[in-house]
Amino acid sequence: MDRRRFLKATGVAGIAGLAGCSGGPTSEGDGTTAESTETSGDGASTEAESGTGEESTDGSSGETINVGMVYATGGLGDGSFNDQAQQGIQQASEEFNVQYEEAQPDSVSQFQNFQQQFASSTNPEYDLVSCIGYLQADALSQTASDYPDQRFMIVDSAVDADNVSSYVFQEHQGSFLAGVMAGRLTTTEFSAGAGSTKPDEKVVGFVGGEESDLIGKFEAGYTAGVKYVDDSIEVQSTYVGSFNEPTAGSEAAIAMYNSGADIIFHASGNTGTGVFQAAQENGNFAIGVDRAQSVTKPSYADVILGSMVKRVDTAVYTSVEAVANDSFDGGAVTTLGLEQDGVALVYGDSLESEIPSAVKDAVTSAREEVIGGSVSVPTDPSNV
């Protein structure tokens, strides 16, 4: 059961014609839903897929909860950040009486428009608008002020407003474990799947999307984890400037692999697909982000050592659950780290069995030290 209407905007006014006039699914006579296309006033097209409004699968009934999802740039299908958020709303729709609509902005300039379209809708009225990604914070600060009776949630940033519930993660902690794994393996002669290390080189890499304090936390934690293993290991780092440029990700990774790196950790959304491609083509390794990317990107599973997962789905699900239970906590900031299982290092689906137990033990020990407080992980790359 897919209780949603899918929105994909190619222009700024993407959901103008739909946010205020959604109805039930259009029957085609065979039980399927119809896909419709509308055109907004500025000529931007919007595709919508209507879902059902039936009783939730856990048997509960009652008033429908309507949720608007505004994803980060890069869109769905990234096998990473946005897809993880979608998993959260899908889980909520299975357990509560939820209908949801999804908007995929192409640029930062579209965030406020989508937020406002959901907030101003009267049919349906949205019980919650979920804003996925720190780049939405500036727009949401204004939108939340303009619509004080609308409930919002945001992932990866804290917005100071009584009608916004914020969820932030300790990405540096999970990235530290990725660094420990990379540091141990790059100093070891290791071959598995389609990759191998260069223990004489002692070089690893980091590829970020857009440069920011948030993505800097990934870099800082990863670098600190590598240095925790061996301070003499070189960590090459670069930012591509986009979360949706696989070609640029590949080019950045190839340059690092050619400079001696054998393992690259990316925090770059769909740009990271290019990092995986480069690893496979060069016979090296990569580490994924946000989701278990050896599963979401199975064609590259033979080079993905693991992924630093970030439970964006937990944040989305928890916020919807709070609305369902009438316990929405506007103004609150929830922090999720290793101790709360908000971040974690998971091993690659294909390569886990090949990773030496000594490396896994080192990662486990590092995790315990971070949680216990004996290791403090920096959040700023300049402090590593």
Image (spheres, grey):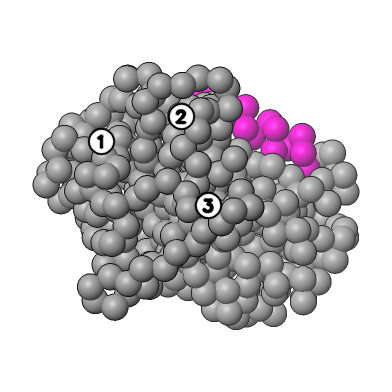
Mark before the other along the chain sequence, 2 or 3: 3
Q: Is residue 192 left or right of residue 79?
A: right
With respect to residue 97, does 129 lie above or below?
A: below
Q: Is residue 173 left or right of residue 350?
A: left
Mark before the other along the chain sequence, 1 or 3: 3
Q: Residue furthest left?
A: 146
With respect to residue 330, does 285 lie above or below?
A: below
The image position of residue 323, as x and y in percent, is: 35, 26
Disc 2 + disc 3, Cβ < 8 Å: no
With respect to residue 274, does 4 lie above or below?
A: above
The image position of residue 248, as x and y in percent, is: 54, 78
**How many labels sit on residues?**
3
From the viewer's side, name the closer residue of 373 and 283. 283
| Residue appearing at x 29%, y 42% in the figure | 124
The answer to whether one can see residue 271 in this image is yes
Q: Is residue 367 left or right of residue 168?
A: right
The image position of residue 348, as x and y in percent, is: 76, 49
Question: Comparing marks 2 and 3, which lies closer to the viewer?
Answer: 3
Where is residue 322, by image quadrant? Answer: top left
Span shown in magenta: 359-378
Residue holding disc 1: 151
Distance Cα–Cα, label 1 vs label 2:
18 Å
Label 3 Cα crowd, 10 Å radius (few <14 / some 14-19 / many 20+): few
Going by the numbered disc 1, the residue's amino acid type is Arg
Residue holding disc 3: 27
Distance Cα–Cα, label 2 vs label 3:
21 Å
The image position of residue 333, as x and y in percent, is: 31, 32
Going by the numbered disc 2, the residue's amino acid type is Asn
Residue holding disc 2: 97
